[in-house]
Image (cartoon, grey):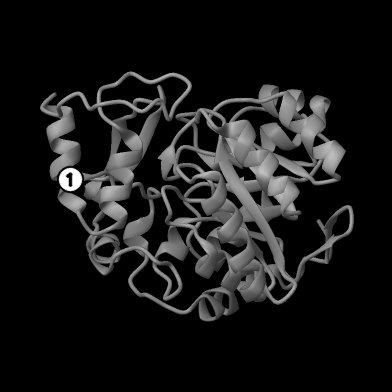
Amino acid sequence: MNIFNNIRLKYPLIQGGMAVRVSTAPLAGAVASCGGVGVIAATGMSIEELRSEIRAARKIALKGVIGINVMFAVSNFAELVKTALQEKVDLVISGAGFSRDIFTWGKEANTPIFTIVSSGRLAKIAEKYGASAVIAEGSEAGGHLGTDRPTAEILPEIKGQVSIPVIAAGGITDSNDIEKMLRLGADGIQMATRFVLSKECSVAESFKKIYLNASEEDIVLIKSPVGLPGRAIKNSFSEALKRGEISEPACDGCLKACSHEYCILEALENSRLGNTDQGIIFSGKNVYKINDILPVKTIINNLSRAFAERITI
């Protein structure tokens, strides 16, 4: 299945990049080996750590497709992107802000750049600058949000504005959700939350347990020092944040612009390591629909019927 340029996929399925260190080599490599796009979340990593993760994912991927996802908001954005390009990743995904330079870097390296967008206007700008595809991410997504509109609303709008592939993202958890997005015109799908509840995702078991036990009422919006709202699972930290009880942290300048209300990277890292009461647990809106932890291969096999009629994107 051709996606663009010389990249071939069994399924037009991208595993979403989840930071900090939720999407790492074991998960990305497993997804790539099963015919999807495995994505390493570069945000919060050092240059050498990212280089090491890409190489480790390659060994697992069995010649499958490996990409990275990085937030434009981080201070070392350019260094992370250029490192990934030097390591010859198959694609780069960028969100939480808009970079014009990234398209020049991608063109020089002959590497496709995907831009996460939430409106037809931004999608059109991304195409103009050279995006190979856009990811239409709606309000159901986990993590930082660029819109309060659902994916089903923004997807047709974005499709009508661009001629490049449009990937649907936000709240997609199973084959029924995939089929709905494909009927709305999506050329492919990005899923993140479902892959946290995989054997290969290397977060702490207590992190996964919170995902498994989450109810629909547990999903909340929180403030982020990045300047965007974030979707997460309610916990002690999010409640303290709502009450204004989080102390201002020491800052090492990891973000280009920061409210300094708390350290987002530290909060995400705490949760990943199992310190869930001291951190943020980003999650998609529909996490409550997922009730098992499965190997990546089983997850993708369960989703594959939704792509049965797809030939190319």
In the image, 206: left or right of 44?
Answer: left
Disc 1 residue type (three-letter): Gln
In the image, 130: left or right of 87?
Answer: right
Q: Is residue 171 visible?
A: yes
- Identify which residue, 50 or 155, lies in the foreground: 50
- Identify which residue, 37 or 102, lies in the foreground: 102
Residue at image position (82%, 25%) is: 128
- Whole-percent x, y for residue 298 in the image: 52, 81
Residue at image position (62%, 59%) is: 54
In the image, 105: left or right of 144?
Answer: right
- Whole-percent x, y for residue 187 in the image: 74, 52
Q: Is residue 16 visible?
A: no
Residue at image position (42%, 76%) is: 199
Q: What residue occupies the far front of the structure in this picture?
A: 48
Residue that carries the numbered disc 1 in the rendered image? 278
Vertical order, 287 against 131 (above or below): below
- Whole-percent x, y for residue 31 in the image: 60, 69
- Identify which residue, 110 or 295, lies in the foreground: 110
Vertical order, 1 against 75 (above or below): below
In the image, 281: left or right of 12?
Answer: left
Q: Quadrant of residue 257?
A: top left
Q: Quadrant of residue 303?
A: bottom right
Q: Label 1: few (<14), some or many (≥20) within 10 Å?
A: some
Q: Quadrant of the C terminus?
A: bottom right
Residue at image position (40%, 22%) is: 227
- Identify which residue, 84 or 170, lies in the foreground: 84
Identify the element where label 1 is drawn: helix
Q: Quadrant of residue 254?
A: top left
- Whole-percent x, y for residue 196 in the image: 41, 63
Tell how many labels: 1
